[in-house]
Image (spheres, grey):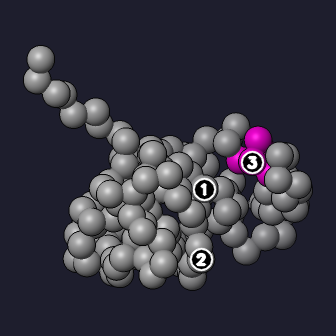
Amino acid sequence: MAEIETVGLGIHWEDLPVGRRFQTVGRTVTEADVVNFVSVTGMLEVLFTNTEFLKETSAIKGRVAPGALVFTFIEGLLTQATMQGVGFAFLNMELDIKGPTFVGDTIHAECEVIECRASNGRPGLGLVRTRNRVFKQDGSEVMVYTPLRLVKGKTYEA
């Protein structure tokens, strides 16, 4: 029987050359997402918990989502699409929040590989850095971050 490719198992570092680009599917941020996220993380700031504060005092008008929530949603989408089974470690990143994300916004990331090389001293592993630009449905950019990941290669053996 012919072998059938299983999708969603990630991309080996050798298949992520500098310049490769891809994007995630979209994810709509809901009220329940914000409530659950701030509750489980302890981010119980009035900006996220008090709609009267938002109406009367805050410079940000509308039900805003924490930047950390936006980041984790995009990481979840990327894990499902590119890192499943091959992601070994998240090493570091720089993060820049460009604008607010609100309940009801649909976000996605456009990613470009900006660094890819074999890991020194770690046979079968590679270092991959991407520039992940997060956009809302209206095309506005809300976040940019550049994670460096340790990724399994085709020859990796545990």
Residue 20 placement: quadrant: bottom left
Residue 127's place in the image compared with 7, above or below, is below
Residue range corresponding to the magenta coloring: 34-38
Does the rendering let one see residue 116? yes
Q: Residue at x 50, y 52 (%)?
A: 158
Q: Tell me the SS state at disc 3.
A: helix
| Res 72 label | 1
Residue 17's place in the image compared with 115, above or below, is above
Does the rendering let one see residue 102? no
Q: Residue at x 39, y 57 (%)?
A: 156
Q: Which mark is first along the chain, 3 or 2? A: 3
Q: Magenta stretch containing residue 37, yes or no?
A: yes
Q: Tell me the SS state at disc 1.
A: helix
**Mark 2 — residue?**
92
Residue 111 spot, x, y in % from top left: 35, 67
Amino acid, disc 2: Asn
- Depth order, front residue of 110/66: 110
Mark 1 crowd level (few <14, some 14–19, many ≥20, 10 Å Cα): few
Callouts 3 and 1 close, C-beta under 8 Å: yes
- Depth order, front residue of 43/156: 156
Q: In the image, is 71 to the left or to the right of 18?
A: right
Q: Magenta stretch containing residue 110, yes or no?
A: no
